[in-house]
Image (cartoon, helix red, strand yellow):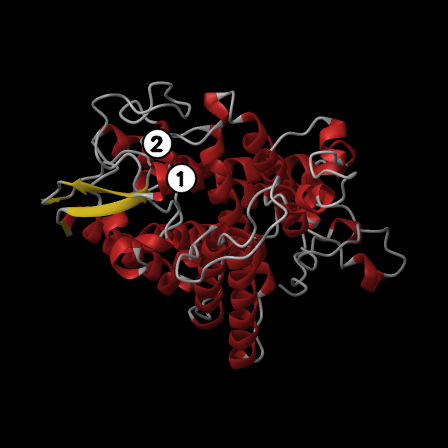
Amino acid sequence: MGVYELVRSEDAAGPAADLEAGRCGSGRLSTPASTPAAAQRQRLVSLDVFRGITVLLMIIVDDAGSFLPAMNHSPWDGVTTADFVMPFFLFIVGVALALAYKRVPDKLEATGKATLRALKLLLVGLVLQGGFFHGVRSLTFGVDVTEIRLMGILQRIAIAYLVTALCQIWLKGDDDVESGLDLIKRYRYQLLVGLLITITYTTLLYGTYVPDWEYRISGPGSMEKTFSVTCGVRGDSGPGCNAVGMIDRKILGIQHLYGRPVYARSQQCSINSPQNGPLPPDAPSWCQAPFDPEGLLSSAMAIVTCLIGLQFGHIIVHFQKHRERIMHWLIPSFSMLVLAFALDFFGMRMNKSLYTVSYTLATAGTAGLLFAGIYALVDLYGYRRPTIAMEWMGMHALMIFVLIACNILPMFIHGFYWRDPSNNLLKFIGIKA
């Protein structure tokens, strides 16, 4: 993502308090500056710590979600701890982009580099989450490209990253910033993009007609079973007849969607809800249908989360005093939370799978509050020692995601066994897939 521009804080004593968010993915910790120039190249540590906390949260919910419902993704409406992970990552990407593209001497070159980075991330996501790897216990790999899953976590981040980077490169004014209103004026076109995306998403979600549809799954003996889903509605936000799923089925193809939908754990689809379990006798026909939680329409609102993070990053760039930065973060954060709960109360439920507007505002507001708290703790008061592990994890977030969250490390270890594939190191240390 490049080396971020220097952000100087006048509240601090001396040049050692100058803040700079360093190179994304760098493996080095900040070291004491030996020269004035080096002193001005310290990282914005709070951003690394926030990213590290999010990585740790991702690992915890992946492992604990199977036996702690509050740590697992919500089966449909509502928000759990796990549902904050993706928005936190997107918010952090936005903050980082504001620092990375503070100044852009060559817009065309910057556009090309941003596009290339997004394509690389997209391809990595296709390999890791497209079905190429067959699980920790399987020593086989490969995927039928006619059934590869096209969307996923890294693909969504790549899309949000690219759109947000292009907005930062091309859509910012030259107005001087001395207040919050000046900040809105300078970046009004970026805010307009976010507003247009939100309006388009809301119009499609609640205005698109969803017809009846059907799908097939393999039954016992490799026989295919066909299920028909009766819809014929507009504005439905339930699992079976929403516009998000319909658009993915039409554009991507149902064979390219995620095959283990989160709503399979809902009360309608599992007698062990909120855990997976056998279907109830009166289960709806859509319970086993593929649905991608990182689909196309829902990814539009993921872009909005990234754009919100971008505006929080602008506050670091244009306001030098700690108090100013924190106040300009707290006000919009609380405002988004109030609006989110109001929308949820009046029927626009918080829903991670659909990435609804209320969910976007609630998670972005929470991210803003958490980031402000971490900034105050780490960059303002200097409590770095308690957060050093989180800082390291944040500086190696992509590596940890690939090795741990995507099970690449367990699969690699599983590939070395004694005579029988079941006699491997994972079995010895008690890890089960």
Report crowding for label 2: few under 14, some 14 to 19, many 20 or more residues within 10 A (C-alpha). many
Relative vertical location of residue 48 with respect to residue 422 in this rendering, above or below: below
In the rendered image, which quarter contains the N terminus? bottom right
Relative vertical location of residue 214 with respect to residue 200 in this rendering, above or below: above
Task: List the single residue furthest toward the top.
Answer: 272
Tell me: 77 left or right of 368.
left
Task: List the single residue furthest toward the right.
Answer: 34
Tell me: 294 left or right of 109.
left
The secondary element bearing badge 2 is classed as helix
Tell me: 85 left or right of 30.
left
Q: Name the residue located 17 percent from the left edge and 42 percent from the top edge.
A: 228
Tell me: 101 left or right of 239.
right
Contact flag, marks 1 and 2 (Cβ < 8 Å): yes
Separation of disc 1 and disc 2 at Cα?
7 Å
Relative vertical location of residue 116 with respect to residue 249 in this rendering, above or below: below
Q: Name the residue located 82 percent from the left edge and 61 percent from the top edge.
A: 38
The circle on residue 264 is 2
The secondary element bearing badge 1 is classed as loop
Q: Dividing the picture into quarters, in which one does residue 142 lie?
A: bottom right
Q: How many marks?
A: 2
Q: Amino acid at mark 1?
A: Arg
Q: Position of residue 333 (x, y in %)?
A: 44, 39
Who is closer to the viewer here, 379 or 234? 234
Q: Position of residue 124 (x, y in %)?
A: 56, 59
Dot 1 corresponds to which residue? 260
Report crowding for label 1: few under 14, some 14 to 19, many 20 or more residues within 10 A (C-alpha). some
Q: Name the residue located 49 percent from the left edge and 60 percent from the top edge.
A: 158
Q: Amino acid at mark 2?
A: Ala
Who is closer to the viewer here, 277 or 39? 277
